[in-house]
Image (spheres, rainbow, N blue to C red):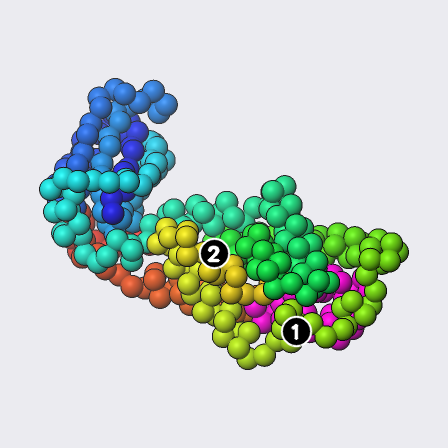
């Protein structure tokens, strides 16, 4: 799998950048467009590079000062049916699926740690769906609520901040989770109170036997194990760019269902349900967070690049 790097290079860095990339055998193709960049002023350099080599090349470009003086963008190449691409893939060590572009991971974490109207809307809708699942004892709605819930992105961002030493990202992500959880529970609890006034629900609605959704507030050691496994899978999906696998992560943990049950327990005052929901929530968050930190730390320590960049031999590469 190749990634395309689009570089806007100011005149004083054109020669160093061309020398750096032109002598790297992992560069499958390079195109230079003199004077094509207007902001910033300079040349445009397009290079196709195997995914597993991108982090090191981006670090080398940063060492040259391109991140400050120029511009860099990264896009995925859908297909590269030419010999040079296959040659570069063979030269680059490791598998494309194991190649983590840490600058992109950090950028995604920064974005996911910031709240938005859509994030809060998804959270409220997901918790509302979860509460209806409890009322109707519907496992289908539980799955739907899990898929709609946006919380994993913020959990992964918090773990990324810890591993990359960007604690401001972690603080923002944890704050986002806390405020969005509280907001969703409050909104759904108010709606549940209105439903109670209208005779739609009663305390017995929550406390009665629920064979299909009772597991939401009955956590056990397997709840933590599932959360850990889901966290590992989720982080690998994010770092490897395999978003399709995230759906399985969403429907493996009961974070949002626990919030829905909590909202109902508070509105209809069922203390046992509240305690069980809080415990389920805590186990899920702990498992996901721990798995995220450990998995990212292992990936961070798993160095697969032997330093093929010109001029980099014997020089330690800064990690970001």
Q: Which mark is residue 156?
A: none
- What residue sits right under mark 1 in the picture? 211
Residue 58 higher or lower than 126, as above or below: above
> How many numbered markers are drawn?
2
Magenta range is: 258-284
> Which of the two residues, 282 or 193, is positioned nearer the viewer here?
193
Furthest residue toward right: 197
Q: Is residue 260 magenta?
A: yes
SS for dot 1: loop
Residue 117: x and y in percent read 63, 41
Query: In the figure, 160 relative to 298: above or below?
Result: above
Residue linked to disc 2:
247
Would residue 296 appear left or right of 288 to someone viewing this image?
A: left
Res 20 seen here: no
Judge whether 256 appears above or below 57 on screen.
Answer: below
**Please, what secondary structure does the residue beneath circle 2 have?**
helix
């Amino acid at each position: 799998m190749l990634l395309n790097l689009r570089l806007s290079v100011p005149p004083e860095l054109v020669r160093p950048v061309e020398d750096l990339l032109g002598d790297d055998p992992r560069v499958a193709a390079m195109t230079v467009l003199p004077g094509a960049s207007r902001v910033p002023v300079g040349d445009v350099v397009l290079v196709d590079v195997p995914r597993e080599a991108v982090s090191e090349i981006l670090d080398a470009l940063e060492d040259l000062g391109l991140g400050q003086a120029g511009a860099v963008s990264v896009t995925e190449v859908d297909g590269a049916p030419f010999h040079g691409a296959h040659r570069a893939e063979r030269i680059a060590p490791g598998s494309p699926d194991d190649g983590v572009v840490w600058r992109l991971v950090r950028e995604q974490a920064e974005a996911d740690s910031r709240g938005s109207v859509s994030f809060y809307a998804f959270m409220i809708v997901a918790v509302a769906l979860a509460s209806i699942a409890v009322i109707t004892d519907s496992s289908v709605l539980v799955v739907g609520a899990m898929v709609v819930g946006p919380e994993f992105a913020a959990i992964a961002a918090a773990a990324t901040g810890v591993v990359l030493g960007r604690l401001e990202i972690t603080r923002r992500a944890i704050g986002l989770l806390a405020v969005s959880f509280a907001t969703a529970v409050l909104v759904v609890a108010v709606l549940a109170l209105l439903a109670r006034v209208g005779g739609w629900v009663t305390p017995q609605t929550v406390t009665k036997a629920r064979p299909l959704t009772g597991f939401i507030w009955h956590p056990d050691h397997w709840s933590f194990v599932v959360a850990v496994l889901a966290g590992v899978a989720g982080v690998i999906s994010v770092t490897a760019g395999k978003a399709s696998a995230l759906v399985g992560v969403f429907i493996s943990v009961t974070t949002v269902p626990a919030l829905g049950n909590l909202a109902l327990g508070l509105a209809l005052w069922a203390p046992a349900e509240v305690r069980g929901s809080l415990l389920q929530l805590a186990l899920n968050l702990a498992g996901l967070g721990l798995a995220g930190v450990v998995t990212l730390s292992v990936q961070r320590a798993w160095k697969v690049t032997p330093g093929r960049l010109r001029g980099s031999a014997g020089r330690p590469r800064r990690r970001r």
